[in-house]
Image (tube, rainbow, N blue to C red):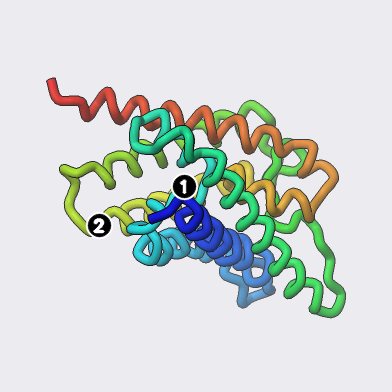
Amino acid sequence: MSLTKRALAELIGTFWLVLGGCGSAVLSAGIPDLGIGYLGVSFAFGLTVVTMAYAIGHISGCHLNPAVSIGLVAGGRFKSSELPHYIIAQVLGAILAASIIWCIASGQAGFSLGGFAANGYGEASPHGYALHAAFVCEVVMTAVFLFIIMGATDARAPAGLAPLAIGLTLTLIHLISIPVTNTSVNPARSTGQALFAGGIYLQQLWLFWVAPIIGGIIGALVYNFVAKKD
């Protein structure tokens, strides 16, 4: 499969991740008495990964996330020379999805952009968590995410179950960390929403690149250490 086609698959996959996850947060989570809340948004993110992993996992690996791609490079599972293509495609897919969410959401009477499912800390955190808490949360959650991705896609792992393990992991990550940072663990997802939310969310975007990338590298390296045959 050509690199162009694999990058296009990553763009489509990341588009679905952000449209499904952030779209559910913007359009469905806050409806009085009927909203899906944090639980629904968490499952929405997990379901996007499960569905798209089965759709494009055999094409591109279904990274959908610069931190995952970088972590897989650190873990020896992905070529560093292909990293720019994947990251550009992922960011473009996230921005495209954010634009679709904005287009739909802005069609409602009395629309207010608000945080637009963007990520933040301090006053931009859903429940006021400070910078250090947000940083630790994003590093640890992404590290665990990569550890499980590496393990679930190991040749020794049960065949065909990786998408479920990875999707459920992302669901659990959101259940833990939505109150802290609105859950990033994905720089592309954060970038798309921050570009529309603007202001403090753009100012704080650096954290949601730095922390997930650090976490992704740590998770991949730890898995390789643990899984290495003696």
> Can you identify the residue that label 2 sits on?
161
At 68% across and 47% down in the image, what residue appears?
A: 191
Asked whether residue 141 appears in the rendered view, the answer is: no
Q: Residue at x 58, y 49 (%)?
A: 178
User: How busy is the neighbourhood of tag 1: few (under 14 within 10 Å), some, or many (20 plus)?
Assistant: many
* Position of 155 relative to 31 (above/below): above
**Residue at (58% x, 51% y) in the render:** 89
Left or right: 136 as drawn, with respect to 109: left
**Identity, as a three-letter code, of the amino acid under mark 2:** Leu
Say above or below: 82 vs 100. Answer: above
Q: Amino acid at mark 1?
A: Ile
Q: Which mark is residue 230?
A: none
Q: CA distance from mark 2 to mark 1?
A: 19 Å
Percent x, y for residue 214? 52, 28
Which sits in the foreground, 89 or 114? 89
Q: Which mark is residue 173?
A: 1
Crowd tier of the residue under label 2, counting other residues whose Cα lies within 10 Å: few below 14, some 14–19, many 20 or above? few
Comes first in the chain, label 2 or label 1: 2
Q: Could you say whether the residue bearing mark 2 is in a helix, strand or loop?
A: loop
Rendering coords of residue 62 (x, y %):
42, 54
Q: Which one is nearer the viewer's eye here, 170 or 29?
A: 170
Viewer can see residue 19: yes
Q: Position of residue 42 (x, y in %)?
A: 50, 58
Q: Residue at x 38, y 56 (%)?
A: 1
Residue 86 rendering spot, x and y as whole percentages: 52, 46
